[in-house]
Amino acid sequence: MSLLSKLGNYEIEIHGAKVKVSIVENPSFVAFKIEELRSSLQMLQNRVVGLDIKFVETKQTSSIAKFLLLCVGTRCLIIKVLQLDYFPETLRQFLSDETICFLGTGMSNIVQELDSREIGMAIKQPICECPDWNAKVFSHEEIKYAIHNAYTSYVIGNKLLGML
């Protein structure tokens, strides 16, 4: 594996699972990583993707999307949407695929009401000060903080769909 392909790749432990995280900002790499997620989905019984978006405040006091986070199984992709020269068609097609169930953190109130025995894991937000999303480099703890909601959304959704 070349040095360039190792950049932006991390292995983060969440709830005992080793999650492989890739951070990408190049549209070609985004397309490649989306195809990896599609391949992972093909091997799973439930076509579930955990989804999250991280926002940053602008000088005009509004917020804009900085990162799009997607998780399938133990693979998570962090896309730096502000750094993209263009929005890749592969990503657009992936996000509009009606055969995929995208689950995100908008359900947080419902999730908190679920009994952790049904889910099979304790649902706790990682303890970490909110990272500076404008930074160029992130620590393992900051990446763990970033992917937590998308990953747990995937795990919970996959488990619940498996109960149907």
Image: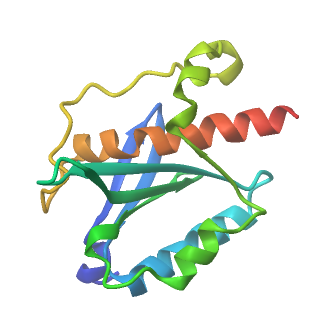
Pick whichever, 3 or 139, lies toward us.
Answer: 139
Is residue 144 found left or right of 105 in the rendered image?
left
Residue 37 pos. (x, y %): 58, 67
Q: How is the image coloured?
A: rainbow
User: What residue appears at the point 24 percent right and 40 percent down from the top-left corner?
Assistant: 141
Residue 75 pos. (x, y %): 51, 57
Residue 85 pos. (x, y %): 31, 84
Position of the N terminus, as image quadrant, is: bottom left
User: What residue appears at the point 79 percent right and 39 percent down from the top-left corner?
Assistant: 161
User: What residue appears at the point 64 percent right and 70 percent down from the top-left corner?
Assistant: 38
Up the image or down, 15 lies above or below 38; here it is above
Is residue 9 found left or right of 30 in the rendered image?
left
Up the image or down, 52 lies above or below 164; here it is below
Residue 147 seen by the camera: yes
Q: Which residue extends farthest right?
A: 164
Residue 121 seen by the camera: no
Is residue 52 found left or right of 54 in the rendered image?
right
Up the image or down, 136 lies above or below 151; here it is below
Pick whichever, 34 or 8, lies toward us.
Answer: 34
Residue 164 pos. (x, y %): 88, 34
How many numbered circles does the render carry? 0
User: What residue appears at the point 49 percent right and 81 percent down from the top-left corner?
Assistant: 32
Pick whichever, 96 or 47, lies toward us.
Answer: 96
Res. 148 image quadrant: top left
